Amino acid sequence: MRHSSTEISVERSPISRRNFLSLTAMAGAGAALAACGSSGPGGDSNSGGKAGTASYWFLTGQPGEGIRQTAAERFNKANPNNKLEFTAFENDAYKQKIKTAIGAGQAPTLIWGWGGGGLKSYVDAGQVEDLTGWFGENAAVKDRLFPSSFGPATVGGKIYAMPCETVQPIVLYYNKKVFEKAGAQPPQSFEEMMALVPTFKSKGIIPYSLAGKARWTNMMWLEFLLDRIGGPEVFQSVFDGQKDAWSNPAVLDMLTKIQQMVKDGAFGKGFSSVDAADNADQALLYTGKAAMMLHGGWTYGSMKNDGGDFVSGGNLGWMNFPPVTGGKGDPTNTVGNPGQYLAISSKATAEQKETAKKFFTSGVLDADETKAWINDGGSVPVAKGTEAILGASPDAAFLKYVYDTSVNAKVFAQSWDQALSPTAAEALLDNIAKLFQQQVSPQQWVTNMNQVIGK
């Protein structure tokens, strides 16, 4: 998988990883048609029936596709003069289609995406509406969503997209049985995490399961460590395109710690051959061959499905990444996917833009859609005030953790490869892989990455 704002979407999408309770259904969706829905895939923003009809493209794959479609149909029923003409695309087809359509000035009225670097490229090209003023006039719409979800929707201090759907922070999971047998306690600091490495190695257990065959899995370690050491401002300076921003001393410290972990065997000897595509890293955790795993919230469901009684038996523990002693990062900070996003094409007509904004006001994450994401999607929507629904779920404890972590995070940073431009993200993942393989030194890594800042 990859993340320039394109590759990452493959794995971070509801189709393959985010909606953790419907994996069987999602697998079936992998063979879905490239495009289906109420219109053909061509639907440009200036076409489609009545003047107020807005085109809306989104992804296939259950349960997300069904939830999106039902929300659009519900909106259409309530608004006969402001309809949505929706089209669903398989993930890879969507990425290419939306890129081509936007480049040709024929984007749908509503542009579904992941925010961050991809959205910024649309902003730089003048292809999406500035929604800052609209959110100022419609404060109630903004106030009902997680504040942290607006980060990837914001470019240059202005809001260009409506946060929607669900939130997926990265979680430090641990196997309670393994900890109990080792007489160990969940770590409260990075130093305690490192102290546990020889404890578990001496018992033949991999301290941290890591699917090193996929580059993005390694990246999650860098994201948290840099936040805890230097605070979120360090990566923010990279995102802002500041010259030599990777030269911050916190980056070298982070990179050095990572390579020391590899040398110490924290990830096991064969981590580079462990594949996230078949959930091999998760299997190491739930079979007791590994003690801990840093991974996305979406893995809870697959471990529940595949791990026998590991989850249902209460053997899975979870926590936020602990602080680094003396570090600047707030321990409530988290990283991952703060939400998905809907931007409005600047090429749309005034009537289409009105329909889109009406959908933002009354359709996006209304009461029915919010319940659907929790009960059918097994995820936490980016809407506030869902505690009661989450509490009634069979997975209430984990969903409440995800909710509290997302709401209380001082900073919810977007995954780096989603936040950066496609060019910078590819270089990032390539250098991260080399770092874990000890093929580049920390200083070489910094030099390489400084060369792609702003590209």
Image (cartoon, helix red, strand yellow):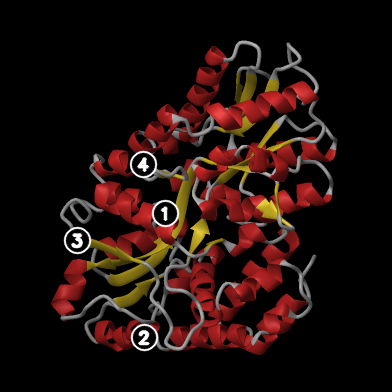
Label 1 close to label 3 by CB (< 8 Å) = no
Q: Residue 194 carries which label?
A: 2
Nearer mark to the viewer, of 4 and 2: 4
Which residue is depicted at the point 72% across and 65% down? Answer: 424
Q: Indicate the quadrant containing the C terminus: top left, top right, bottom left or bottom right.
A: bottom right
Q: From mark 4 to mark 3, how far is it between C-alphas? A: 26 Å
Q: Is residue 124 left or right of residue 386?
A: right
Q: Mark 1 points at which residue?
A: 278
Q: Which mark is residue 386?
A: 4
Label 3 close to label 2 by CB (< 8 Å) = no
Nearer mark to the viewer, of 4 and 3: 4
Q: Is residue 440 left or right of residue 172?
A: right
Q: How crowded is mark 4: few (under 14 residues within 10 Å), some or many (20 or more)?
A: some
Nearer mark to the viewer, of 4 and 1: 4
Mark earlier in primary sequence (4, 3): 3
Mark earlier in primary sequence (1, 3): 1
Q: In this view, does 446 lie above or below 81?
A: below
Amino acid type for the residue under numbered disc 4: Thr
Q: From mark 4 to mark 2, how far is it between C-alphas? A: 37 Å
Disc 1, SS: helix
Amino acid type for the residue under numbered disc 2: Met
Q: Mark 3 points at which residue?
A: 315
